[in-house]
Image (cartoon, helix red, strand yellow):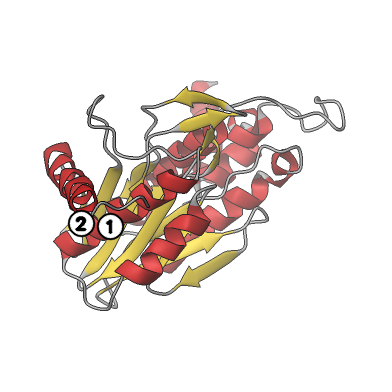
Amino acid sequence: MQETTANKVAANATSSFTEHLQRDRPDLLPYNRTPADSQPAGTHLQVPHATTIVAMTYAGGIVMAGDRRATMGNIIASRHIEKVFPADQYSVLGIAGTAGIAIDLTRLFQVELEHYEKIEGTLLSLDGKANRLGAMIRGNLPMAMQGLAVVPLFAGFDTAAGVGRLFSYDVTGGRYEEQEHHAVGSGSMFARGALKKLWRPNLTEDEAVSVAVESLYDAADDDSATGGPDPIRQLWPVVYRVNRAGARRVPEQELATIAGNIIESRAAARREA
């Protein structure tokens, strides 16, 4: 019996772990665990939502950053949530929307890329990664129609082209390649305004990290769902930089220095906003 099961699994082997689950264990997929029709029409679950994510290109790669706050209606559900994750060696994923589903989708996406690498013996192209993430988001559409949407931001280093690239999505899984910079989440409107003023071509890596932190600072100033740098609790944004050397998380000590410089410069200028 065990040999028969093993032969069946081998015969149905695919480079997509998600397709494998959809065929053999659809109940394990994040968007299939709760039937779409189980919630009464016109009602919305009160669950934590994650915001805000910013990303931008710089000379040699991509920087992505996310604040640490999750909200549930008008309540701060968490001040410690992490919203930016490495997808694989050369890409990162930032989540906005329903936090629980988004985190499960992120874990599934990480396994999807690792599974592909083990089956095929090579990394999936950056376009291929972006397309597979879009398919996962599209699978969550029934839940999104109930208010449980997931809208991530995806970025990575294209090893073939030698540049950093950035992709945004809508709730239907539509994929859009962004130029220069982008932001998602409730504070994205304010973050984008800051990015338009602070970003410039050929930023250095350190300058890009500083711009990311300052854009989140501006978003937190006007959006109550976005948490700014918190020197009292020693809470700083989660920031990743991705270049030819791979994805690396920026140390908190470095972020504390950057945030401190931003606060000091604005205090010295006696700025109200």
Asked if residue 149 lies left or right of residue 224, the reply is right
Q: Quadrant of the N terminus?
A: top right
- The secondary element bearing badge 1 is classed as loop
Type of residue at label 2? Answer: Gly
Residue in the image at 39% along x and 70% along y: 196
Q: Nearer the viewer, residue 225 or 25?
A: 225
Q: Nearer the viewer, residue 95 or 31?
A: 95
Q: Position of residue 111 (x, y in %)?
A: 41, 41
Position of residue 141 measured from the top left corner of the image (x, y, whole percent): 70, 47
Q: What percent of the width, then of the height, locates residue 239?
A: 27, 47
* Residue 202 x %, y %: 22, 77
Residue 246 is labelled as 2
- Residue 11 in view of the camera: yes
Q: Quadrant of residue 120?
A: bottom left
Quadrant for residue 81, please give it.
top left
| Above or below, comparing residue 46 to residue 253 in the picture | above
Q: Dot 1 corresponds to which residue?
A: 90
Q: Residues within 10 Å of mark 1 (few under 14, many from 20)?
A: many
The one nearer the camera, 122 or 29, is 29
What residue is drawn where x is 42% and y is 44%?
220
Element on which disc 2 rests: strand
Closer-to-camera residue (134/94): 94
Residue 119, visible in the rendered structure = no
Q: Is residue 49 left or right of residue 139?
A: left
